[in-house]
Image (cartoon, helix red, strand yellow):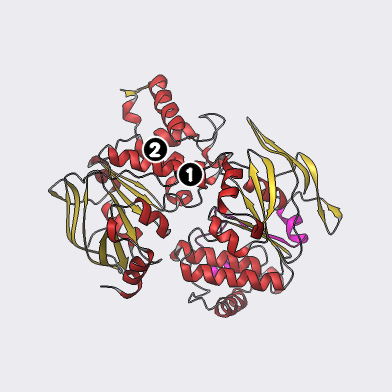
Amino acid sequence: MAGVHKRFPGVYALRDVNFDLREGEVHALLGENGAGKSTLIKILGGIYAIDEGEIFIDDQRVEIHSVNDAKHNRISIIHQELAQVPYMTVAENIFLGKELGGALGTVRRGAMIAEAQKLLDSYELDIRADSVLDSLTIAQRQMIEIIKAVSFNARILVMDEPTSSLSEKEVEFLFATIKKLKAQRVGIVYISHRISELFEVSDRVTVLRDGQVIGTRVTRETDAQSLIAMMVGRELTNYYTRTYNPPGQEVLRLENVSAGKLIRDVSFSLHAGEILGLAGLVGAGRSEIVRVIFGLDPMASGELYVRGNKVRITRPDEAMALGIGLVPEDRKKEGLFPIKEVRFNLTIKVLQKFMNLFKLSRAKEAAIVDQYIEELSIKTPSPEQLAGNLSGGNQQKVIIARWLATKPSVLILDEPTRGVDVGAKAEIYGIMNELAAQGVAIIMISSELPEIINMSDRVVVMGDGRVKGTLPREALSQEKIMFLATEGM
């Protein structure tokens, strides 16, 4: 890709970007959210039109104006926000756009299910091809997208944050798959904010900042601190920000809570000014228990107390009235209004603050919006920009800002830094630390153990829908957490 430029209204997304990929190599793209990584690969995938520049494959100039043009050139992209149809089957999603046809234009669904099942079995995934995609976890859906991409003879494969929702075992499967693809001379563009991954799988790293290439490094000849400095334009020394304060009064307590088919006899407490980490493997029940707390799923048995008072929360508005906020794991499905403005997304939960009867105070609304755009360093050309046009990390910060505007006493963060760059992560950690210092009680679910260990006062480890153990800050280690997660008490 030579001399690539791309402009959006109010944004110069890419400026004279040059990028090359070799057969059988993994070339990582690194940069903060909004640096231009996703824009570059969407041009390669035919989703965005190129404004200026050229694309060459095997030294031959090619025109990529559509997704079909990309497919014709054997380019396959696994996007960070999964492009799937949730109410179709796994098989139908795998064969989407490549359906097996029969006589008179019919679709051979039985044959597609059989072929898809062979693929799933070959990758040792315990998933039925005829199951509805929406019934699967995010991690399973991510694996389906990976299988779909690698199973149709791609020569150029782009992976945008492929491990963001995978367990350790699934990450191992992905890395083994990458090694096989390299041996088959497939060129892979790999985008990840987890810099440690790049040193494990990539051959070269190109760093983008503000839509421009800062430089390309041979991976084995550089280090993490040098790459971070290239990304953010400065040394990022204070990555995890945490000042520990004595916990305040108890604000939330669960006693023997059971719900659905998974959650069984879960008990733990949360105190003002505390960050309580929820750790465990994928499917341990972490997201399920906070959905019960927030009233999204019904509680079958047990007791829930808020500030010492026994409560029954059956709907999210009841949780909000008690001062509880939830930043969900799946921001695209459960958090964001992508075709509405940043302003709308930020203030939708606090309309009463600037409503007087049926009149809206635009000045009060603007003050709230401007405050949180500045405090969270949300990169947007204006509050009127559509939220869906922002980068993934900036979308996440918009959702966090929405809940901060409600002034919650309990804030639940489910994978708060998923798909977020190191600079934005540091900002989110700083926000969490400041909220805890102000007395806000935080529950943080995270699959990144360094994040859990460095940000938590205590850690509740879950497995098979139960609490396997609770660790105080001074006893935290990856080994102890993983032992509880896999072996139990």
Give the amino acid type for the residue marked by disc 2 in the picture. Answer: Arg
Q: Which residues are magenta?
A: 67-93
Q: Judge whether residue 226 can be spotted in this image.
A: yes
**What residue do we see at 68% from left, 66% from top?**
98
Give the amino acid type for the residue marked by disc 1 in the picture. Answer: Thr
Q: Residues within 10 Å of mark 1 (few under 14, many from 20)?
A: few
Please check the rendered image and state whether residue 79 is part of the magenta-colored stretch, yes or no.
Answer: yes
125 and 270: which one is in front?
270
Query: Is 75 placed left or right of 441 in the picture?
Result: right
Q: Secondary structure at mark 2?
A: helix
Please check the rendered image and state whether residue 91 is part of the magenta-colored stretch, yes or no.
Answer: yes
Query: Is 364 placed left or right of 234 in the picture?
Result: left
223 and 338: which one is in front?
223
Q: Are marks 1 and 2 in contact (CB under 8 Å)?
A: no
Query: Is 336 placed left or right of 59 in the picture?
Result: left
According to the picture, the residue beneath numbered tag 2 turns out to be: 402
| Residue 110 pos. (x, y %) | 59, 77
User: Which is more N-terminal, label 2 or label 1?
Assistant: 1
**Relative vertical location of residue 236 with respect to residue 88 in this rendering, above or below:** above
Query: Is 482 placed left or right of 17 in the picture?
Result: left
Q: Quadrant of residue 368?
A: top left
**Relative vertical location of residue 203 with respect to residue 488 in this rendering, above or below:** above
Q: How many marks?
A: 2
| Residue 414 pos. (x, y %) | 38, 53
Query: Residue farthest to the left?
Result: 309
Query: Residue farthest to the right?
Result: 60
| Residue 136 pos. (x, y %) | 45, 66
Res 237 label: 1
Q: Secondary structure at mark 1?
A: loop
| Residue 54 pos. (x, y %) | 81, 46
Q: Judge whether residue 107 can be spotted in this image.
A: no
**Relative vertical location of residue 321 with respect to residue 199 in this rendering, above or below:** above
